[in-house]
Amino acid sequence: MSKNKSIGTSLAAITAAEQTLGRPLPASYVQWLLENNGRALGALNVFPVYDANCARKTWESITRHYNTSWKEWLENVDGGNDAGELLPFAQFGAGDYYCFDYAQTGPSGEAVVVLWSHETGATSSVAPDFAAFLALPGRPG
């Protein structure tokens, strides 16, 4: 039997991340994290929640990215756009982020997925929720 912890995480680790972020994570993202925390989608690195049981794989967590890289980008982008309702869950390319936009909800009741441009601060809608994002043909990664 393998001594390696299987990929995935616990509800306790997810709850801790939600408390740190000050908002609930979308249900389809939570479900994905429970099974895939620490995995990439092809070449696209989806931010995990930090899990002490798998610290090496989850160190670059959604909370870490939100509190460091994301806040640094927002301080430097002159787009005049309010990004306060955005929560980045994956970095795309050289600084753009896939984000949950909590100002918009899709038919499932979850936050819409948008792509945020580091050059302009503008967003473009990508999918009505994380589950639909996962199913996109030609999704980066």
Image: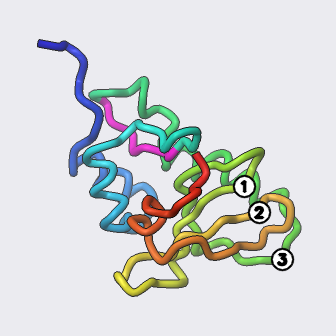
Marked residue nearer the N-terminal end (2 or 3): 3
Q: Tell me residue 132's x, y (percent).
A: 43, 69
The amino acid on which the numbered mark 1 sits, given as a three-letter code, is Asp
Q: Magenta residues?
A: 46-52
Q: Tell me residue 129's x, y (percent).
A: 44, 72
Q: Tell me residue 15's x, y (percent).
A: 28, 55
Q: Quadrant of the C terminus?
A: top right
Residue matched to label 2: 117
Marked residue nearer the N-terminal end (1 or 3): 3
Residue matched to label 1: 96
Determine the CA span between mark 1 and mark 2.
5 Å
Image point (33%, 27%), residue name: 54
| Relative to 118, 98 lies left or right | left
Q: Tell me residue 111's x, y (percent).
A: 46, 76
Question: Does 24 appear above or below 49?
Answer: below
Tag 1 and tag 2, C-beta contact below 8 Å: yes
Q: Is residue 50 magenta?
A: yes
